[in-house]
Image (cartoon, rainbow, N blue to C red):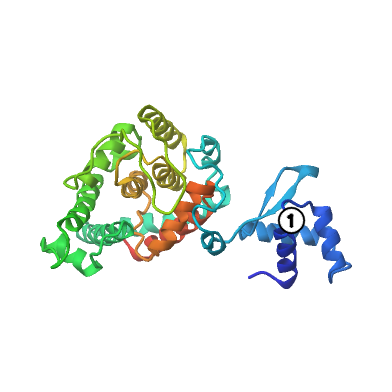
Amino acid sequence: MISERQQLILEYIKSNEAIGIADIALFVNENGYPTLSRITILRDLEKLILLNRIRKVGSARATKYEYVLSVDEYFDIDPDVRVLVSDSFNFKVWDKIKTVLTKEEVTHLNKVNQKYVSNSKTLSSALLRKEYERLTIEFSWKSSKIEGNTYTLLDTERLIKEHKQAEGKKQEEATMILNHKKALDFIFEQPEYFKELSVKKIEELHYLLVDGLEVGSGVRKRIVGITGTAYRPLDNEFQIKEALQKLVDIINETTEPTAKAIITILMISYIQPFEDGNKRTARMLANAILHAHNFCQLSYRSVDEIEYKKAMLLFYEQNDFNYFKKIFSEQFIQAVNIYF
């Protein structure tokens, strides 16, 4: 929640392209708060930045404040009318993505993960297998559902446990879910494998996820479009391979597992290196990285599919990772609390 005064400041910034602290202070003083100090106004601005309602641009005396559209406001705008940072791959994104988590956020997520580390050590082998099975079922269900799969959670549980397909469902839906299980089994059997990443390992995981779904393996050689956005990924095979290698280098250089996972999901989805199955590969690879570093994996059990897609579109169009970061953090904390 924001105060009445902070709402006043927000509306003023919204009505201006970029505004400095001096103009904001003058406006606030003339509109109901004649004795308000500059320090208090700066605190209000910091809160609005924290809530992602405004952003700060420039530094020192050149600092300006800009309005940030809310997610709902942004998606009220027609896809072909929205103004994108770039309608094609923005190579400046590499520098931005390296700062995906603040030190405070890293510290918080690491502290949360200690509960997972502590709890998993106390479980017997049988109980540990049971928890992995539960996570496998729920992740396979939700990750597939995000991609339009119509299997229910109960359908998915029966498919994985009893190998019984749901009546009236397409074969490819069952295959998609079982491919998730196959990929997770691969990860669980050799957890150290994804501690150091390579393009080959990404391609291996993708192959497991699209096997039997009539999707070409390896880096795509043709243009792909993304529903609901004017953003177009790289369309040159050699540029795609270069982007994948750069991503691998950045992930291997990044020290924090949660930052590695977020970068993986965002950038695999942004590059779209494969004909299909990119977001599935991104989520699976992020979980593989987390598992390799003894961090809890995410099932995304409670995530709203539409909100997840909005988070991806915001990154495609604005290179804004904050909405997805919020979803990831919430799902990570939930996973630690409900598994193991």
Q: Quadrant of the N terminus?
A: bottom right
Q: Residue at x 31, y 38 (%)?
A: 202
Tell me the kind of residue under disc 1: Asn
Specify whether residue 15 is in view: yes
Disc 1, SS: loop
Residue 300: image quadrant is bottom left
- Give the crowd class for mark 1: few <14, some 14-19, many >=20 residues within 10 Å: few
Residue 169: image quadrant is bottom left
Query: Percent position (x, y) of residue 6?
Result: 72, 66
Q: Quadrant of the C terminus?
A: bottom left
Query: Percent position (x, y) of residue 262?
Result: 44, 48
Residue under label 1: 16
Above or below residue 278? Residue 301 is: below
Q: Is residue 22 left or right of residue 160?
A: right
Query: Percent position (x, y) of residue 230?
Result: 47, 48
Residue toward you, 317 or 82 = 82
Residue toward you, 274 or 262 = 274
Q: Is residue 256 left or right of residue 240?
A: right
Query: Percent position (x, y) of residue 57?
Result: 69, 46
Residue 131: image quadrant is bottom left
